[in-house]
Amino acid sequence: MSEKKDIFISYKNDGSGNQFAARLSQDLEEAGYSVYFNSKEERAASFPERLTAAVKGCKDFILVLSKGCLEQLRRGDAIDWIREELLTAWENNKHIIPILLDGVELPKDADEMPEALRFLPHIDALRFPEQYKLSPFSELQKVFCSKQDGGVQFRDAYNSNPEYDVTRDYLTIRERAEAGDVQAMYELGMMCFYGAASEQPERCGWDYDGAVHWLRKVSASDSELRFHADSILGRMYYQGLVPREPQSYEKSYALQCRASEGDDFSARERAFMMRIGLGCRFDFQSILDYYDSCRDRGDDESIRAFALFLAGYGRYEEAMELYNTIENLSPETEYQIGLLYLRGVHTDPPQPDYVQAAYHFRNAADSGHLQAAYEYAAMCLRPTGRFKKNFPEAERYFKIAADGGVAPAQYMLGYMYRTGLIRRDLQAAIHYLELARGQNHTQAALELASIYQQPECQNYGQAFLCAELVASHGMAEGELILGNLLFWGRGCEPDMDKAYEMYQRASDHGLFYASLMMQKIRELEHLSE
């Protein structure tokens, strides 16, 4: 598989165009960007597949508009590779950046362009003066979607582990699954979910259709694996990843309820959804009863969640008692303990008034209180009681808080753009999630670890760095993703020992699939002896 480049430079080989493009390419590469610039391409005859693939694989498409280039586009020549590159970028929703060289002006009337190119005059362009040294290079960098990580060695490595043949393993497991082996069905569904399903070497195999197909078969079985399959299916409905079906908190909650009978991770997910009334009716006593049934699990995560829930409803003494049973307090837990001392008003029994809460949050937000803007937006996104959802309002107020530097708001805005609650815009999602990641927001880093493995945003090097950050904070899903990357050799050198360590940690945190990967590593080590 040819290496993908983040920035594609399109130009006319007419002296000024190619000289500028060559200089720009060199400066961008020296600044750490990944650039596609082919000065030796024979531009005659049909448009080659390699250029199509390069344009489809880029994030930023730079169109160097010299006088000769613009004149050629306006003429509509029969053979015009620049036009084909530009149209390919437009049709694939690439971020197009026209650069106007000295003396070049785009027509004010779009009708002066050929019909297929009438979008071009409406795209904001940058003007570069004749003297390159005076060019606004810093302004160009500001508009890039691309990051300065072009030197990351493993950014396009789908599987660089010489000890593991992902395609052979996939085909072997699929054969067993098709023969009725339930464990193989579960493994195959998880391979599809995590992008390891591929019949051809070096081809990314993200397959949510396959994941749903095989995990539903496991869910319908009487195997203990059905709980773990329901856990993943519930997560897919929560994130809107089930093909041809809308995002559904209700279906997610129902699946997490079933999964919680045999999957510890789902038990915590179910408790989270119960306490905010997401996908289910808010019932305070039912939540208390459920948490009481979970206390015997003894893990800090459940105790912390229960204490946070109690504190939110004025049960301060009980919450403090629970917090004191946690051996290793996280910064977030200590923050919540601080809030316990700050709060003094409560009702008995607790009965939140979400309409009044939203009223005051919005008043404060409109006066410039960023945290209030975040809280109000969160209510618009995940409504409870008589307060109804309002996604456009959520986007507006999350953006106020996010642009003001509130990391949770940056994360939530990125989440909305990723899942399409307003519109699906992965580049906007990456922008806001990266802002949150810059403030060490681990949930944002977890989202990015997944996004950067998607074909349209593929950057395994960044996925690895994000997964490392998440795993370092003890988050189970991050530990599993990091284990997968280390095992497959995506974004890093393959390291079976470190992968095993991450799988062990993820398994200890309740992710069953990690235990199967540990078994796979032991089997590979046995074969190599």
Image (tube, rainbow, N blue to C red):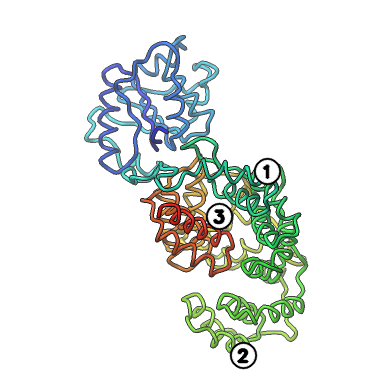
Which residue sits at x=27%, y=28%? 22
Q: Which quadrant is home to the C terminus?
A: bottom left
Establish if 440 lies above or below 215.
below
Question: Mark 2 or 1, which is nearer the eye?
Answer: 1
Question: Mark 2 or 3, which is nearer the eye?
Answer: 2
The amino acid sitting under disc 1 is Glu
> Residue 496 location in percent, x, y?
41, 57
Label 1's element?
Answer: helix
Determine the CA span between mark 2 and mark 3.
35 Å
Please name the residue that numbered disc 3 is placed on: 413
Q: Residue furthest top?
A: 78
Query: Mark 2 packing: few (<14 Cα in 10 Å), some, or many (20+)?
Result: few
Label 2's element?
Answer: helix
Which residue sits at x=26%, y=18%? 15
Left or right position of 116 against 28: right
Please name the residue that numbered disc 1 is placed on: 178
> Residue 119 location in percent, x, y?
52, 26
Which residue sits at x=49%, y=46%? 453
Establish if 300 lies above or below 219.
below
Residue 317's tag is: 2
Q: Mark 1 and 3 residues: CB-CB less than 8 Å, in contact?
A: no
Determine the CA span between mark 1 and mark 3.
41 Å
Which of these two is toward me, 198 or 32? 198
Which of these two is toward me, 323 or 494? 494
Q: Is residue 392 visible?
A: no
Query: Mark 3 packing: few (<14 Cα in 10 Å), some, or many (20+)?
Result: many
Label 3's element?
Answer: helix
Which residue sits at x=28%, y=30%? 129
Location of residue 5 by image quarter: top left
The amino acid sitting under disc 3 is Leu
Choose the circle earlier in sequence order: 2 or 1: 1
